């Protein structure tokens, strides 16, 4: 199968087949459709020259050249319906062809000549939006073996890449749960690609839009591709049941989560009180420990679903240290489940952790302004100023101050060194004035020192 292939509603399956490669800026070939089409109109990118067309056989003879863009789409219009066929420019396709056929050095040289300073990210995006999945994984793997830039680009995006392809419209769209599992397996077989876990991808799908203050159709889209939230992870060991509960609680209400929990398997035979005591005293894996409690909460003499659910979501979020963007969802769900009678500091802590997690998500997105705003909210929560029942928490305040200092320094580029120094002085003062563990102060100072040096070296 050729690397550029996919499905279009107007023309069925399409495929670009190269005939002759006359250097990076002239790729001669044909675009073939699986069914005849005669569009009312069509537009092509500036880098694509149409040499001949035969709509009866569904064939375009084309030449890929160079232009202002390295990737664009052919636009087809028929009876007011539009379809877009993604295609690469000559240099971009040349790099893909050389890379897939083992000539990675020539491929890298071509990309670096025809792309800008963000070549790794832009080339990755072009391939993601145009190639079929296996070609995409193969070319990333080939480039990452020779270039640290591509290693970093795919490492930061693997989980989100799979989550966003679920029910997507592009050539790498995932329309079945089996396809999702097969593609993750194929990805993980590649030596240069960072492993991605299926539970993280599902959690990312459920949580990646919440911190942007919106919900989509995430649960339904997962069900549409064949994912079964009831039977998945019957031992309650992954983040998935917690993310599903949080999504239900926040997008609907607490009562919507009860039937879901009640329908899932019960993984342990111990009594409810015994499991709850084990969860309270667990040193590690407290999330799964509370999951086994939640699984039978409704069967206990005293229904404590909100308390047990709050602990389950909170400890699942606390115990996760990966790159997926569902921790804000879990902390928000835990906050909604937390019974009103719990001490105020627990509610305050959940709100604080939620905003810190939101800030880190925006940091990974490169949205400096929104990152800064989230850490500002976290600082106010730690200060105790957002609720009359909250008190100043110096431990959390130190963490918020460090994160906010870094976020603000990135925006204040003209005086960022001085801003880092001011943040470190503030943290030291907090340590002297309040009972904050010395390791926490040292950790915050070390974080800012390293970020300051990184900014100076970049």
Image (spheres, grey):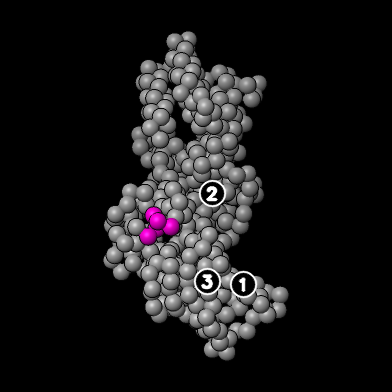
Residue at position x 54%, y 64% from top? 72
Residue at the outermost bottom position:
56
- Is 112 included in the stretch rendered in magenta? yes
Q: Which residues are magenta?
A: 110-114
**Residue located beneath label 2 in the image:** 208
Q: Nearer the viewer, residue 82 or 230?
A: 82
Identify the image quadrant of residue 340. top right
Identify the image quadrant of residue 167. bottom right
285 w.r.t. 215: above or below: above
Q: CA distance from mark 2 to mark 3?
A: 36 Å
Residue at the outermost top position:
433
Identify the image quadrant of residue 386. top right
| Chief SS of the magenta region | helix
Residue at position x 38%, y 64% from top? 95
Residue at the outermost right position:
80
Number of the label disc, if any, that sits on residue 48: 3
**Picture coordinates of residue 196, whole percent (x, y):** 38, 54
For residue 439, say whether it is visible: yes
- Is 57 included in the stretch rendered in magenta? no
**Picture coordinates of residue 398, whole percent (x, y):** 47, 22
Residue at position x 39%, y 25% from top? 449
**Residue located beneath label 1 in the image:** 43
**Mark 3 closeness class: few <14, some 14–19, many ≥20 residues within 10 Å:** many
Q: CA distance from mark 2 to mark 1?
A: 34 Å
Q: Nearer the viewer, residue 61 or 370?
A: 61
Number of the label disc, if any, that sits on residue 438: none
Q: Are marks 2 and 3 in contact (CB under 8 Å)?
A: no
367 w.r.t. 205: above or below: above
Q: Nearer the viewer, mark 2 or mark 3?
A: 3
Q: Secondary structure at mark 2?
A: loop
Labels 3 and 1: the sequence-earlier one:
1
């Amino acid at each position: 199968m050729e690397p550029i292939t996919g499905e279009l509603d107007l023309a069925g399956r399409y495929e670009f087949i190269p005939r002759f490669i006359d250097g990076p800026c002239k790729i001669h070939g044909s675009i073939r459709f699986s069914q005849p089409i005669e569009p009312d109109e069509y537009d092509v990118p500036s880098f694509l020259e149409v040499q001949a067309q035969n709509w009866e056989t569904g064939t375009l003879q084309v030449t890929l050249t160079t232009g202002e863009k390295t990737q664009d789409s052919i636009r087809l219009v028929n009876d007011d319906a539009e379809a877009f066929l993604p295609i690469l420019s000559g240099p971009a396709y040349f790099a893909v062809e050389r890379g897939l056929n083992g000539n990675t050095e020539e491929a890298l040289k071509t990309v670096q000549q025809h792309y800008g300073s963000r070549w790794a990210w832009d080339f990755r995006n072009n391939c993601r939006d145009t190639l079929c999945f296996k070609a995409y994984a193969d070319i990333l793997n080939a480039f990452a073996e020779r270039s640290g830039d591509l290693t970093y680009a795919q490492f930061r995006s693997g989980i989100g890449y799979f989550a966003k392809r679920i029910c997507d419209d592009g050539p790498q769209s995932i329309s079945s749960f089996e396809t999702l599992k097969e593609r993750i397996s194929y990805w993980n077989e590649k030596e240069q690609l960072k492993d991605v876990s299926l539970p993280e991808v599902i959690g990312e799908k459920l949580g990646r839009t919440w911190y942007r203050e919106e919900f989509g159709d995430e649960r339904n889209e997962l069900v549409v591709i064949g994912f079964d939230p009831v039977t998945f992870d019957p031992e309650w060991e992954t983040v998935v049941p917690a993310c599903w509960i949080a999504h239900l609680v926040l997008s609907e209400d607490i009562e919507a989560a009860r039937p879901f929990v009640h329908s899932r398997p019960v993984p342990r035979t111990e009594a409810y009180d015994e499991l709850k005591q084990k969860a309270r005293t667990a040193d590690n894996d407290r999330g799964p420990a509370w999951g086994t409690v939640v699984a039978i909460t409704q069967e206990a003499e005293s229904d404590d679903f909100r308390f047990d659910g709050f602990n389950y979501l909170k400890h699942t979020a606390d115990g996760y240290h990966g790159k997926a963007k569902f921790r804000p969802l879990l902390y928000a769900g835990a906050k909604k489940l937390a019974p009103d009678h719990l001490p105020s500091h627990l509610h305050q802590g959940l709100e604080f952790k939620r905003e810190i997690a939101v800030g880190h998500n925006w940091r990974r997105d490169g949205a400096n302004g929104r990152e800064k705003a989230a850490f500002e909210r976290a600082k106010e929560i730690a200060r105790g100023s957002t609720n009359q029942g909250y008190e100043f928490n110096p431990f959390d305040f130190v963490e918020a101050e460090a994160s906010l200092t870094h976020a603000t320094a990135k925006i204040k580029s003209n005086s960022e060194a001085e801003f880092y120094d001011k943040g470190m002085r503030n943290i030291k003062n907090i340590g002297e004035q309040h009972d904050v563990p010395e390791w926490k102060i040292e950790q915050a100072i070390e974080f800012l020192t390293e970020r300051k040096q990184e900014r100076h070296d970049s």
